[in-house]
Image (cartoon, helix red, strand yellow):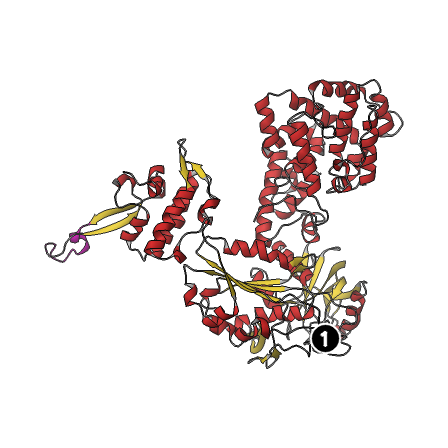
Amino acid sequence: MNTLSRYNPNHHVEPIYNAARKWRDTSLTAGLAVFADGKELLSRKLLDELDQRFVKNLDAGEGDFLSKLKVQLSEGSPDCRQLMAESLWLMLLFPSNVGAAKKRENVLEIWSWSGEDLNATHPLLADGVLEGIGSAGTAYNTHRWRELVFLIGALRDFTARDGSEREQIASDPWAFSGWLSSLPEARHRQLIHILPHLLFPDTFERISSEGDKRQILAGFGDTPEKEIKKWSTVEIDRALLELRRRLEEEHGSDIDFYQEEFESQWKNQTKNWLLSWNPSRWTWDTLAADRATTISGEKADNRWRCSSSKPREGDRVFLIRTGSPPKGVVAVGKVTRAPYEADHWEQARADAGETTRFVDVAFDSVRDATSDEIVPLEQLQNREPGQEWNPQSSGIEIKAKAARTLERLWKALSPIASGATPPGDDTGSGDASPKKLTPPLNLILYGPPGTGKTHRLKNDYLPRYQDEAGDRFEFVTFHQSYAYEDFVEGIRPVTENGAVTYEVRPGVLKRLCDRARRAPDKRFALFIDEINRGNVAKIFGELITLVEVDKRIRIGASGNRLASCMGLEVTLPYSGERFGVPANVDVIGTMNTADRSIALLDSALRRRFRFEELTPKPELLESIDDGEGNAIDLRQLLQAINSRLSRLLHRDQTLGHSYLYHVKSFDELRRVFSREILPFLQEAFYDDWRQIRYVLADQAVEEELQLVRARAQSAAVLFPKADPTEIGDGEAFEIIREDEITPDAIRKIYEPPE
């Protein structure tokens, strides 16, 4: 996954970044105007004039910015006024707290002072370009003259440098940031954060304040903000880039630090707490009323038991139902009163004078686990095993990463409609004719390792099942121990108060199908990685028939099966429920053919799925420098290895391009060969060194070029008690050390010496 600081959930930002890139390529690099084609505008002469007319002639008197600016530039040349208009336009690209119409009006007015009119319909003045990408705060606007002074000074410094240095600054994100932040007064200006993001949005965050950047790093890391204040701007931005990569890896998707689930961790330093509710011990008499209150958009106020004294007002609270199934998170809200002592919630203990600790909570969403979709306890335990999800007491802190995961799962739940009825209740279904629905997709991506199957799954298919409401998919990996009980449903032991009981729990497919029934107008997907590593017949059981396209059931608006549909249902063996796979559930898997050929795949599965082969693509690879000024052609290297693997084994057991796709240096190639490719060959040939040496062209080269080295083994050493004259010496093989791999040894694989 690419790390994208340009990701913005609230705005369509590409037109803005395209405009900023045009300014960099046209104005910063070539010195030309962006509003007047071919006209030289960003020159040292005109910048010096702006410095004389504006920077050294500041007006601190009464009047607004434009009226004072007009007076300051009244003796200036027409071109310097146009340069000021373009400079202000650049400054206004970022802020979203200034309207597009106002920005356009300002730029047009300043340009008009040159005696020429600028067309208001110019593409760079369109609303899509001027709508902004983030708040810059009020100070950026009220003190815009300070930012303009800094910008003019920066451009004067830039134009005074030699051509090669200017080219490096304009093309390298870290060179640009280092240069800009090293200028006088830079640390006090927001432009040192705004300009790097506009010009290099994949590297620098969409954040205009160093204060926010410091808080984010402190909120997600272990370094106090007072220590981060000592860091340079570049050090802060590099740390943010590493943090983004870590969080994107955790979440499997692009992130924005101003989204609620992330902002709550750094902006107000709020914490997340898990309160618990066991229905068998305490009856929530107002549950129905609280649920109705939150459905209507109001808060439901409650007092709840809390063993911890640490929660504070404003902290986030999640309520988990424990004890009897269904177990899981059923409500969310905020602490409205910090922990306090009050009479015990059990009347008998209260009568005896006992007290306990409570917090007051305003729930903004309450669900009834018997009728509404909740976040299952089992799912939380699987996704975040390091967090305690089934506490013995109410009021434990949820760790930051686990809290973000829970927030995402909660937001992914289907909305509760006002007056919603429990599943299975046909009252007032209101189903007429079913909507036209795309046929379900049953697809398996297959091919050798490293051909991008999982990458394709996550980047091409997974985003189709994500929207502003959350994820509409489940992701599992099959393995030898994966069973029907994990996939469909099974009986699981539950220990409570020392007693062991057993309950029926739904598996991943059944849980997903239950969610899909509640949202029949949306598509859901089950992604199965390494589908051929599991026993498909045992895992799917009777559902192997139900996933067939023409056996799917259609669901009406109320979540009930439509009587007019011909889909099949079966009786599940553990729960005894009638169950069918909805037509809005897609099943998409991957299969590594190096583990198992497609010909050996369960025939029942083969009949019910469409198969799409992914093959190695050497054409995606490039040459690298070997460190001595010579090239190593990765494309030819992969082609040569795969050609021999196909002849000696099978095309299913070749190497995919991803093994070498990210290799950019010879040291990286050494590591890949030593730690990935050579172990792959050992496994593929069952340590048949003769054939491995054929693949590596080791058979007819000098010893110093061999990647697999032969060495004699003395019979006397191997069999010290035997007569060495009766046992001939043997030959053993060893893979050379990583640091011994030479460029010539790699090149001779595809260019065998004569």
Q: Main secondary structure of the magenta part?
A: loop
Q: Quadrant of residue 147?
A: top right
Side of 188 relative to 631 (left or right)? right
Is residue 721 within the magenta segment?
yes
Give residue 96's position: percent from left, percent from top: 77, 42
Q: Which residues are magenta?
A: 713-725
Q: Quadrant of the C terminus?
A: top left
Give residue 667's position: percent from left, percent from top: 42, 39
Above-or-below relation of 33 to 418: above
Q: Is residue 405 visible?
A: no
Side of 533 relative to 76 (left or right)? left
Could you say whether the residue bearing mark 1 is in a helix, strand or loop?
Answer: loop
Give residue 53's position: percent from left, percent from top: 79, 19
Q: Residue furthest right?
A: 62
Is residue 601 within the magenta segment?
no
Q: Residue at x 55, y 81 (%)?
A: 573
Give residue 616's position: percent from left, percent from top: 45, 51
Mark 1 crowd level (few <14, some 14–19, many ≥20, 10 Å Cα) = some
What's the amino acid at mark 1?
Pro
Side of 366 relative to 255 (left or right)? right
Q: Nearer the viewer, residue 355 or 221?
A: 221
Q: Is residue 283 visible?
A: yes
The residue beneath circle 1 is 422
Above-or-below relation of 528 to 697: below
User: What is the number of callouts on the image?
Assistant: 1
Q: Residue at x 26, y 50 (%)?
A: 733
Q: Nearer the viewer, residue 117 or 31?
A: 117
Q: Nearer the viewer, residue 49 or 121?
A: 121
